[in-house]
Image (cartoon, helix red, strand yellow):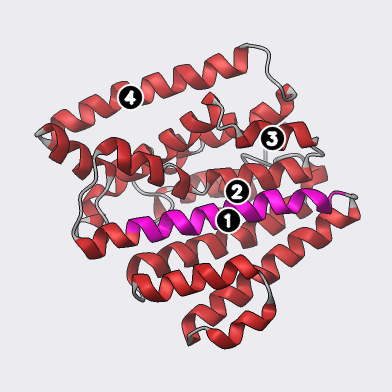
Amino acid sequence: MWRRTYGLNTLFFEPCYTSWRIIPSKLLVLVSVTDDTFDAYGTPQEHQLFIDLLRRWEIGALDELLGYTKVIYKAVLDVFDEIDDEARKQGRSNFVPYARDLFMELVNGYQWETKWYHDGYIPTFEEYMTVSQKTTSNEIFIATSFIGNGASVEAFEWQRTDPKIMKATNFIGRLMDNIVSRKFERFREQSPSSIECYMNQHNLSEKDTLKDFEKKLEDAWKDVNEDCMRPTAIPRYLLSRPLNFDRAPYVFYKTGDGYTHPEYVKDDIRAMFFDPITI
């Protein structure tokens, strides 16, 4: 839990946003469990039933689900009820559906990845990234941060247009995750990663693929910087949310997969939460 809170501090580090660090931390646990469920449990048919019933977004649908999906379905409703309750205190519950829509988009992406694995299909790099940039889950956390930050409807509509900085944020998150987890993921039965898709499409070695990815990451950062330096439809303090999310992978993944294996970031967590600052 500490590593999750550590990551979400990139979105909400200000003391006034305490509650908006707690709620997204619960959302992050929910997203992680849902992701692992689609990766390793059930069938595409069971997952599709879960998605179809989730579109109804009502507690009565629980009776139509299997045991393990009932637990997740109930957790989804509970977490979003908490988000709605907290937003209502600020008169902002009308923005919660934006986050809910992004959660639906997220699970639909998980389903595509599950189908690729079960079909033995290796998509092109571009096809893979179209889906897997969305399954980074960055967008739902940024939308949640907008709710807590008092963003206007224009900010949520801006995010829906998939601006450069959002595309780059998802791109950076996906490639960084795939690069550091590539050795571990080979031992898990799941859909191919961006590395495997790129190698297969371009007939390249892993070494050459990683070299190409370095250039792609540099280009993505240029897009981030471009959107941060020019006038946009949203205030600059809101742009800092995706910008800070882009910085986080370079901490989590600097020596290994710090999200999956927290020992890689234990010193950073200790420095942020426990070690006193000498003044």
How many residues crowd mark 1 within 10 Å: few (<14), some (14–19), many (20+)?
many
- State how far apart marks 1 and 3 are (Cα): 16 Å
N-terminal-most mark, 1 or 4: 1
Q: Is residue 255 visible?
A: no
How many dots with numbers? Answer: 4
Q: In the displayed structure, does residue 85 sit left or right of residue 241?
A: right
The three-letter amino acid code for the residue at tag 2 is Ile
Q: In the displayed structure, does residue 181 sit left or right of residue 254?
A: left
N-terminal-most mark, 3 or 4: 3
**Residue named by callout 2:** 140
- Asked if labels 4 and 3 touch by Cβ distance under 8 angstroms, the answer is no
Q: Name the residue located 62 percent from the left edge and 77 percent from the top edge.
A: 74
Q: Quadrant of the C terminus?
A: top right
Q: Which residues are magenta?
A: 92-113
N-terminal-most mark, 2 or 1: 1
Q: Name the residue located 23 percent from the left edge and 25 percent from the top edge.
A: 212
**Residue named by callout 3:** 157
Q: In the displayed structure, does residue 131 sit left or right of residue 71?
A: left
Q: Nearer the viewer, residue 241 or 265?
A: 241
**Residue named by callout 1:** 103
Residue 121 in magenta stretch: no
Residue 105 in magenta stretch: yes
The three-letter amino acid code for the residue at tag 1 is Phe
Query: Which quadrant would residue 262 be assigned to in this image?
Result: bottom left
N-terminal-most mark, 2 or 3: 2
